[in-house]
Image: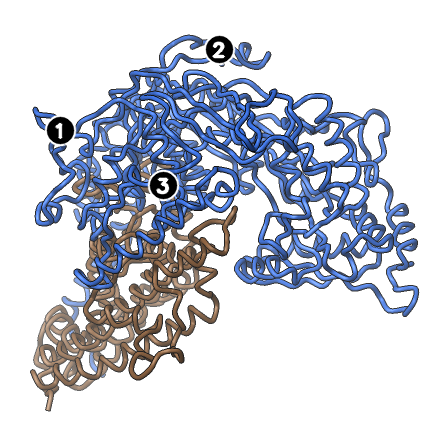
Chain colours: A blue, B brown
């Protein structure tokens, strides 16, 4: 009886909870069959403010909301910039120191300024938002709220009215000024202040004004008050950025900086309506309510954030004011066969709502994907063999189980690089001396990245021949692209030089058989690395084995991430691993990692190896300012030749990204440079419902079995209890 | 009793200061304010100026414990420790290092934690006590023997195994409940069935064995023999005498654990995607968010002290011999 009751209660609870057909459906029954995309996230976004956010995870949200002037073409590769909110691609106007216009091919030495005039399309509207709400007379409703009214608001939904307005050039200018705002602390301010005329001066003025205002604020409300008075950035002119007319603005850059257009495709240069800044700056908005730009973005893009519970779930809904964007009608040759052009010309977005659920653990995430409750998934190392098999030629394909489910595999080479750096400031492995150079070359040959990729990356990577990954201008395929220091070209493919070649180089460096020829002492090198747990042991052992090939003793100096970074910053390292993920698809964004003036230890730059070669640096200055073409390719070839010979890095590998998508999710093409492709996704909801029902039929016999076991366990006890109670007392 | 409570509350003050000081010291032995700034600002293009600004905005630009540049009491008060600690005693947790309100997070997240912890606690207590009583009743029989064997076997298995195995069997293979996730309101039931069941199974071995020992100890005492000699039924002996007296040591652990139910479960919340305070603490440790770590440790200390106070007070209810004098 008890068992039956338990089983009945369980079933009733499940039904009451609205499980419907699939008992394990984690979504509300009311959402079944709706045009909703289901995705996940791991880490809580730290900020959704476009001036502060600088991680791919955060951009996955905000690039659906904010529209910078430019974007990357969804299908074309190599990556190509196209207008987004802009009416057309901006062309730089080159000026000399006196402001006279120069020819587009003027030498860099003559160019004092580059001017970008950006014209945006008229008629673009913001999402509905309370900051833009007005009364019948056009007066803002929520920009001067009394504090007691703000205390009653907890989300944007608590504001009954919303409004919209047209996007104007002033909004873009306002956002650029925000990069200099002392309270925003934009990560690219340091970089951009070197280029955008007047940005540094604006920051100094704003800093002074902020200090004055905060002092007065603290005197009135106390130092602990989380509020801060609003600074109307319109009152602070920025010398290098001006509004030309309602739909046009102009940005003046110091010298030549052709890569500036790539920044115009990032959220840092998205528009920010002044009303939003003012709305969120009202005292009390951030007092336990999180009513800030960090939580509630406001944009003109295809989606708007309507639910923000970063502990569990975030949701984007279709922006009703979005103008619609035609699906691209051109792409790579294979795109048509892959069905990626089936929706060409149709107005996007196709999906009504996107729900992101927080999944911190890999096992539930993977199983929910297999159950059909996530529409797409990455592949972790743990699940790789379950999902993918790699043939002898290195071609990846789905396992029969995945293929039978109709899952699609999408692969792409990341615009990133992972390398082993030799600290150029180190007396043993660093510096331009022949001895150190040959030692670095020997180690570069000995460290077998093909093996590393096979063991630790499940084959997901391409050995690096230099810093530039495939798909970026400057990367060469075939024999012309190999690193001749480490590889030979044999039978139409690169082959790592034999270890004897490395030993020979090592002997020439003065370390025959891994011993210093002068002292007879064994050569000991130190590798700084981050150890996260016992799982890292195989990797660390592998590092040791690579150096043992040359009889070099490798001493591992493990530390946490903070100490590791500190050592790299101070140049207190010898060897270390590091990676770089591109900001934009330009060779400059990789080659600058070896530019001497960017030395991490000396200037805090991104050249973590502190490599310095005057010739490389001279070529870099030329290369970075010219357009892609034969001249630039020749410069890059020469720079790579120098860097490969100097070997400041063992070039490591370029990771490959593997992604899975269910058959019902259409138009999925990986894009390493942008996360705004959601608007082009389409879902066949009928197929999804059918598959989910097929894959998730509840199995009821375990409940019956559990009940039977309970009865079987309890019944003898009850019988024994009754027997004992009825038994006569025993004599001693 | 009031004097006793007041005295215990006063004892709590130095304990809380000590806990806060230890947390502070441990945290800043491993991290520096600069590490925290870098963690929040990201790894790319971070300038020293941006780090200084971040530190200044959040009050991490002061010395840790002693400000030699100031005079008088300001040497102690114008420090990170004082500034960050003193408001805790008013339960003003301030903002996390990412700028978000900690109080708001705690208020939001405690409900999912309680939704998981209370059923696990109550159902668990009922099941463990019942099973322990059954084993005690059938002491020295095959049921007792195999029951203890089962308990030892169950307590030897890691909780993580129960979680992963439970998710695989119940959700993936049998499709009976969602594998993870959470929704507030009545929909929460389907998400909580599995974690509650697993919590029950994971704690079964250790708790039943412990409670059985308490009950067996009581059953060997004279008053139980006397009760039996009076001719009382075994159920009356068990529930009327043994359970009451055996409950005293159980109460010690149980009542002390009640306030800590707020703090949630670190592992279960992560695996089942329940947005409670346990996962909040784990996130904060991973993000090196001192403001949150400090607040959660402080809250944990307060609740632990409260729990032990409640446990002591509850003795008077179940054992009339105990007096607070």
Instruction: Name which residue lies at 79% across and 61% down.
Output: A428
Q: Which residue is mark 3?
A: A178
Residue A192, percent across and down? 49, 40
Q: Which residue is mark 2?
A: A341
* Mark 2 burial class by Cα count in 10 Å: few <14, some 14-19, many 20+: some
Instruction: Name which residue lies at 75% across and 36% down.
Output: A639
Q: Can you tell which quarter of the image residue B186 is in?
A: top left
Report the chain holding disc 3: A
Q: Which residue is mark 1?
A: A134
* Mark 3 burial class by Cα count in 10 Å: few <14, some 14-19, many 20+: many
Residue situated in front as seen by the camera: A313 or A292:
A292
Residue A705: in sight, yes or no?
Answer: no
Residue A611, percent across and down? 71, 50
| Spatial separation of the CA atoms under disc 1 and disc 3 | 25 Å
Instruction: Name which residue lies at 25% across and 50% down.
Output: A711
| Spatial separation of the CA atoms under disc 3 and disc 2 | 39 Å
* Mark 1 burial class by Cα count in 10 Å: few <14, some 14-19, many 20+: some
Q: Can you tell which quarter of the image residue A173 is in?
A: top left
**First of labels 1, 2 by sequence position:** 1
**First of labels 3, 2 by sequence position:** 3
Q: Nearer the viewer, mark 1 or mark 2?
A: 1
- Tell me if A11 is positioned left or right of A245 in this view: left
Q: Outermost residue toward the bottom?
A: B325
- Tell me if B12 is positioned left or right of A332 in this view: left
Determine contact: label 3, label 2, CB under 8 Å. Answer: no
């Amino acid at each position: 009886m008890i068992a039956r009751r338990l089983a009945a209660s369980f079933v009733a609870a499940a039904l009451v909870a609205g499980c419907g057909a699939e008992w394990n459906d984690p979504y509300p029954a009311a959402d079944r069959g709706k045009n909703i995309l289901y995705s996940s996230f791991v880490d809580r976004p730290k900020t959704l403010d476009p001036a502060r956010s600088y991680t791919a995870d955060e951009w996955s949200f905000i690039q659906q909301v904010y529209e910078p002037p430019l974007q990357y073409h969804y299908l074309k590769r190599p990556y190509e910039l196209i207008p987004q909110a802009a009416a057309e691609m901006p062309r730089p106007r080159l000026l000399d120191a006196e402001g006279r216009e120069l020819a587009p091919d003027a030498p860099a030495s003559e160019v004092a300024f580059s001017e970008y005039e950006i014209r945006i399309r008229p008629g673009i509207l913001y999402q509905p938002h309370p900051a833009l709400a007005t009364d019948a007379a056009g007066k803002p409703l929520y920009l001067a709220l009394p504090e007691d009214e703000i205390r009653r608001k907890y989300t944007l939904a608590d504001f009954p009215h919303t409004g919209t307005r047209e996007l104007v050039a002033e909004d873009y200018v306002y956002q650029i000024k925000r990069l200099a705002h002392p309270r925003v602390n934009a990560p690219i301010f340091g970089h951009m202040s070197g280029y955008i005329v007047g940005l540094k001066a604006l920051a100094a003025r704003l800093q002074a004004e902020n200090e004055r205002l905060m002092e007065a604020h603290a005197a009135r409300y106390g130092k602990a008050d989380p509020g801060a008075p609003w600074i109307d950035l319109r009152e602070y002119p920025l010398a290098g950025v001006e509004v030309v007319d309602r739909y046009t603005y102009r940005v003046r850059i110091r010298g030549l900086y052709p890569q500036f257009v790539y920044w115009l495709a990032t959220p840092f240069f998205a528009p920010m309506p002044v009303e939003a800044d003012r709305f969120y700056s009202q005292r009390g908005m951030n007092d336990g309510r999180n009513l800030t730009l960090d939580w509630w973005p406001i944009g003109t893009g295809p989606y708007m954030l309507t639910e923000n519970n970063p502990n569990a779930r975030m949701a984007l809904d279709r922006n009703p004011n979005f103008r619609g964007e035609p699906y691209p009608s051109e792409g790579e040759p294979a795109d048509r066969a892959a069905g990626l052009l089936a929706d060409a010309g149709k107005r996007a977005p196709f999906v009504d709502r996107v729900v992101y659920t927080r999944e911190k653990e890999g096992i539930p995430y993977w199983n929910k994907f297999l159950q059909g409750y996530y529409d797409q998934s990455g592949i972790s190392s743990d699940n790789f063999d379950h999902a993918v098999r790699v043939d002898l030629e290195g071609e990846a394909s789905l396992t029969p189980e995945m293929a039978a489910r109709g899952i699609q595999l999408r692969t792409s080479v990341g615009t990133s690089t992972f390398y082993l750096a030799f600290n150029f400031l180190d007396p043993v492995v660093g510096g331009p001396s022949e001895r150190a150079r040959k030692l670095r070359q020997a180690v570069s040959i000995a460290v077998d990245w093909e093996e590393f990729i096979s063991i630790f990356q499940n084959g997901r990577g391409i050995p690096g021949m230099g810093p530039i990954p495939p798909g970026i201008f400057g990367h060469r395929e075939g024999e012309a692209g190999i690193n001749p220091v480490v590889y030979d070209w044999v039978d139409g493919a690169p082959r790592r030089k034999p270890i004897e070649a490395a030993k020979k180089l090592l002997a020439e460096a003065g370390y025959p058989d891994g011993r210093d020829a002068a002292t007879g002492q064994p050569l000991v090198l130190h590798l700084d690395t981050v150890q996260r747990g016992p799982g890292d042991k195989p990797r660390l052992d592998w590092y040791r084995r690579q150096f043992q090939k040359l009889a070099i003793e490798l001493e591992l100096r493990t530390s946490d991430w903070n100490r590791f970074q500190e050592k790299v910053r101070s140049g207190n390292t010898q060897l270390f691993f590091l990676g770089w993920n591109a900001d934009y698809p330009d060779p400059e964004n990789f080659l600058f990692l070896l530019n001497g003036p960017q030395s991490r230890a000396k200037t805090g730059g991104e050249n973590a190896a502190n490599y310095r070669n005057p010739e490389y640096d001279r070529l870099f200055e030329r290369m970075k300012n010219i357009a892609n073409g034969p001249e630039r390719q020749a410069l890059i070839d020469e720079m790579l030749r120098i860097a490969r010979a100097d070997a400041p890095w063992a070039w490591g590998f370029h990771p490959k990204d593997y992604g899975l998508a269910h058959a019902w999710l259409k138009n999925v093409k990986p894009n390493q440079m942008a996360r705004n492709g959601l608007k082009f996704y389409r879902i066949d909801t009928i197929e999804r419902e059918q598959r989910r029902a097929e894959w998730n039929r509840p199995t009821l016999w375990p409940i019956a079995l559990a009940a039977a076991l309970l009865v079987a366990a309890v019944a003898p006890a009850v019988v024994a209890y009754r027997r004992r109670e009825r038994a006569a007392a025993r004599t001693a | 009793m009031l004097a006793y409570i007041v005295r215990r509350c006063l004892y709590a003050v130095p304990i809380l200061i000590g806990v806060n000081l230890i947390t502070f010291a441990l945290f800043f032995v491993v991290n520096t304010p600069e590490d925290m700034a870098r963690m929040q600002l990201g790894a790319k293009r971070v300038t020293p100026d941006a780090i200084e600004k971040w530190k200044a905005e959040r009050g991490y630009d002061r010395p840790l414990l002693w400000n030699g540049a100031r005079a008088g009491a300001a040497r102690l008060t114008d420090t990170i420790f004082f500034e960050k600690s003193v408001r805790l005693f008013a339960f003003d947790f301030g903002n996390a290092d990412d700028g978000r309100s900690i109080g708001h997070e705690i208020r939001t997240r405690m409900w999912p934690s309680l939704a998981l912890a209370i059923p696990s606690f109550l159902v668990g207590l009922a099941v463990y006590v019942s099973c322990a009583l059954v084993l005690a009743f059938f002491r020295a029989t095959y049921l007792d023997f195999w029951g203890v064997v089962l308990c030892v076997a169950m307590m030897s298995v890691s909780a993580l195994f129960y979680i992963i195995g439970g998710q695989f069997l119940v959700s993936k293979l049998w499709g009976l409940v969602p594998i993870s996730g959470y929704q507030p309101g009545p929909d929460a039931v389907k998400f909580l069935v599995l974690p509650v069941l697993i919590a029950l199974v994971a704690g079964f071995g250790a708790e039943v064995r412990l409670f059985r020992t308490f009950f067996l100890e009581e059953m060997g005492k004279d008053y139980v023999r006397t009760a039996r000699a009076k001719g009382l039924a075994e159920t009356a002996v068990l529930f009327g005498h043994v359970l009451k007296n055996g409950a005293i040591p159980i109460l010690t652990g149980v009542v002390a654990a009640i306030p800590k139910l707020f703090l949630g479960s670190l592992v279960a919340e992560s695996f089942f995607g329940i947005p409670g305070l346990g996962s909040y603490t784990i996130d904060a440790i991973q993000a090196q968010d001192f403001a949150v770590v400090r607040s959660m440790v402080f809250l944990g200390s307060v609740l632990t002290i409260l729990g032990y106070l409640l446990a002591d007070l509850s003795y008077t209810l179940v054992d009339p011999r105990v007096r607070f004098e």
